[in-house]
Image: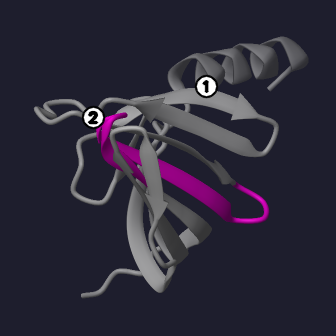
Amino acid sequence: MNARNDILVWSILAALITPAQAEPVHLACYGKIRVTEFRGSHAEELPTQEGQSMSVIVDRSAGTVAVQEYGPVKLMGNLGDVWVFGGKPENETTQMSFDGYVNSVTDETVIVIHFGHFDQGGLRRFEGTCKPAKPAF
């Protein structure tokens, strides 16, 4: 083959090969949960719950993040190594939303779940680390 044929072959291959869609990443997260309850104008910080776990699914192709059993919320973007997400989960009928971030290098993760109204609701703040989950079976 000559140089012109080589260029033609590589051009055709480049046109045919498209990057594969990224598969959703399943994360196993471990850390602590701090709960704050709101009652009218008063806020009560409950004892920190150590040794807690959460599951997180990051789907970059769909642009979403799902936490636990809740529907996905929008993956808002990244600030360097930090992926930021938030919103009201799809198909969620309660007064609940969440936001947070995952650092893809240090695994540091913070997820804040807002439930109820500010005068009769609360916050659940997860602080921990997330690692790619290993299949259980």
**Neighbourhood count class around disc 1 (C-alpha, 10 Å): few under 14, some 14–19, many 20 upward:** few
The residue at the point 80 percent across, 26 percent down is: 1
Comparing 135 with 107, the one in front is 107
Residue at the limit of the structure toward the right, as seen here: 3
Residue 84, placed above or below residue 131: above
Q: How many numbered marks appear?
A: 2
Residue 61 visible in the shown view: no
Residue 11 visible in the shown view: yes
Left or right of 96 in this view: 11: right
The residue at the point 56 percent across, 44 percent down is: 100
Left or right of 13 in this view: 67: left
User: Which residue in the structure is indicated by mark 2?
Assistant: 89
Does the segment drawn in magenta span residue 114?
A: yes
- The x, y position of residue 22, in whole percent, is 49, 42
Does the segment drawn in magenta span residue 58?
A: no
Mark nearer the viewer, 2 or 1:
2
Q: Main secondary structure of the magenta part?
A: strand
- The residue segment tinted magenta is 104-124
Q: Quadrant of the C terminus?
A: bottom left
Residue at the limit of the structure toward the front, as seen here: 41
Q: Secondary structure at mark 2?
A: loop
The residue at the point 21 percent across, 33 percent down is: 95
Left or right of 41 in this view: 105: right
**Neighbourhood count class around disc 2 (C-alpha, 10 Å): few under 14, some 14–19, many 20 upward:** many
Q: Amino acid at mark 1?
A: Leu
Dot placed on the residue nearer the N-terminal end, 2 or 1: 1
- The x, y position of residue 52, in whole percent, is 44, 81
User: Which residue in the structure is indicated by mark 1?
Assistant: 13
Q: Secondary structure at mark 1?
A: helix
The residue at the point 61 percent across, 37 percent down is: 84
Q: Amino acid at mark 2?
A: Pro
Image quadrant of residue 135?
bottom left
